[in-house]
Image (tube, grey):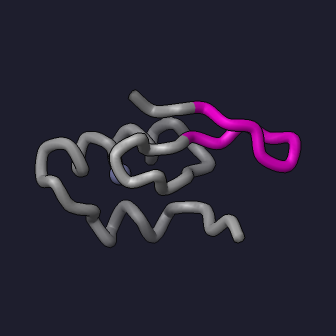
Amino acid sequence: MVKQEKYKGKFIFVCESCNFRYATREWAEKCEHHCETKHSCSLEITKHAIKIK
Ligand SMILES: [Zn+2]
């Protein structure tokens, strides 16, 4: 399940498999689907992740 979190007043979406965060649910769902089926992260997907310090 993609988790929704609030960050700096906006909602962001988190892949529960790898904990990468995305600005859109679409990317988080793509990431999660990839994580669950391939058991690894896709660079093509994770490059869209938000970097949070
Ligand atoms: Zn993921």
Q: Is residue 45 magenta?
A: no
Image side of residue 31 versus residue 37, left or right? right
- Residue at figure coordinates x 20%, y 61% from the top left: 40
Residue closest to the far right: 9
Q: How many marks?
A: 0
- Residue at figure coordinates x 45%, y 39% from the top left: 26
Q: Which residues are magenta?
A: 4-13
- Residue at figure coordinates x 33%, y 68% from the top left: 44
Image side of residue 37 versus residue 26, left or right? left
Residue closest to the far left: 38
Image side of residue 2 versus residue 12, left or right? left
Q: Residue 43, position in %: x, y?
A: 32, 71
Q: Residue 35, position in %: x, y?
A: 24, 50
Residue closest to the far top: 1
Where 18 falls versus 6 (above or below)?
A: below
Image side of residue 27 versus residue 9, left or right? left
Q: Main secondary structure of the magenta part?
A: strand
Where 18 falls versus 41 (above or below)?
A: above
Which quarter of the rendering shows the C terminus?
bottom right
- Residue at figure coordinates x 27%, y 65% from the top left: 42
Q: Is residue 7 magenta?
A: yes
Q: Residue 39, position in %: x, y?
A: 16, 54
Is residue 15 or residue 43 the one in the foreground? Answer: 15
